[in-house]
Amino acid sequence: MTDSGTIEDLRARVALERDTIIAFLRELCAIPSMDSQIRDVGERAEAEMRRVGFDEVWWDRMGNVVGRIGDGPRKLLYDSHLDTVGVGNPEEWDWDPFEGVVRDGVLFARGACDEKGSTPGMIYGLALARELGLLEGFTGYYFGNMEEWNDGSAPDALYNVEGLRPDLVVIGEPTDMQVYRGQKGRVEMRVDARGRSSHAASNHLGDNPIYKLLPVMERIRRLEPEFRDDPFLGDGRVTITDIHVDTPSINAVPNHATCFVDRRLTFGEDPHEELRRLQSIVGERDDMEVSILRYEVPSYTGYVYPLDKIYPAWALEEEHALVQAGLRAGEMLWGPLEKPGKWNFSTNGVFWAGKAGIPSIGFGPGEEAHAHTVLDQVPLEDVVRSTEWYALLPATLLQAEA
């Protein structure tokens, strides 16, 4: 049972760990973990979990790190991806992206927002939850994974291959310290056009596949008014994200061209129907085809977990006990939170909630708008305060379900 005394005890314990939590985050950000190369940063998280008293820490075959604490009958998993996107052009940064810089209480560094900022609070929050009797009834898990390579793959493999099946999940992607309860889905597709190469000086002898794609791309550009609009998740979107050409040289008619399509799905939109929509645009022809992309890139351990690039939309109803527990934890700590929101981008929730149907919410420091930018940042005070929320949630969840 939580009361004002419990809250004060929790705040006092988090305050004692404040400098350690901040130092831990800065160390995580200082370890490059681009292109899903998370072994080094995962080992740093592993060391911290062992130091604060996790009962067990191990690595799955994909190369993600998992920690377990507590022995309750229900499994509560905190999900935070430890990989980041690259830094792009280093000259666009005003500071070393890994060393980072603190200005007015905000840490600027690669991964500070997306998503290393939630890791210290999750690890310390679970440890303090057990210490203060707030974890009763639960076994807590921290899942430090690779997500940038293909969101949802890591939890898919953890669930279906490793056999760890949580009852409830909290995703640490940035929510600006609010509770999120859903996101759009997406499907990634490609349109391939075959042609015939020739010298550019004799282009009449060739068959240019780029020209075959142009009317298709123009039609795709105008599709959005045909899409659905959900009151909570918003409307469907489509973007041509890349074009690839196979050509003998830049002085030749190419023999093959591909455009890649990112289709953001709201509720009521089916990825296979979207495939058929593109197929109807292309029409019945032998020199063009449409397909859904398939991810088969090995992780850094060499493990391959093939999946079609289909990512379901999901939303947990606002009345669900997990959403209400998240709101209650925030209210007890800092006053009422805003109405539960949603991410604009994609998260591991596409598997946890979208495919496995596990009740999931999001909570983390940082703002989504700063992800993947040279202004990647997180307020350090929110990193520390998030620890309180992660620690308190199991207890407010028991109360919400009572």
Image (cartoon, grey):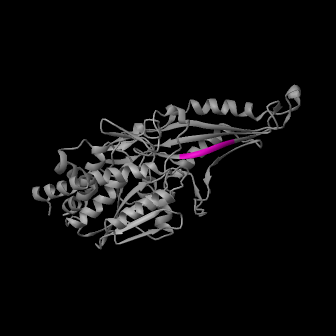
Q: Give left or right: position of 73 versus 8.
A: right
Q: Is residue 271 above or below residue 129?
A: above
Q: Residues in magenta?
A: 187-191
Q: Is residue 177 at all visible to an observer of this figure?
A: no
Q: Is residue 165 above or below residue 205?
A: below
Q: Main secondary structure of the magenta part?
A: strand
Observer-nearest of 138 and 142:
142
Observer-nearest of 187 and 271:
187
Image coordinates of residue 280 in percent, x first then y, are: 64, 40
* Residue 32 falls within the magenta-colored stretch: no
Q: Which residue is found at the position 10% from the left and 58% from the top?
A: 5
Q: Which residue is found at the position 88% from the left and 25% from the top?
A: 201
* Residue 188 falls within the magenta-colored stretch: yes
- The quadrant in which the C terminus is found is bottom left
Image coordinates of residue 7 in percent, x first then y, are: 15, 55
Snapshot quadrant of residue 365: top left
Q: Is residue 248 at all visible to an observer of this figure?
A: yes
Image coordinates of residue 249 in percent, x first then y, are: 81, 35
Q: Give left or right: position of 81 versus 219.
A: left
Q: Is residue 113 above or below residue 206?
A: below
Q: Which residue is found at the position 70% from the left and 34% from the top?
A: 213
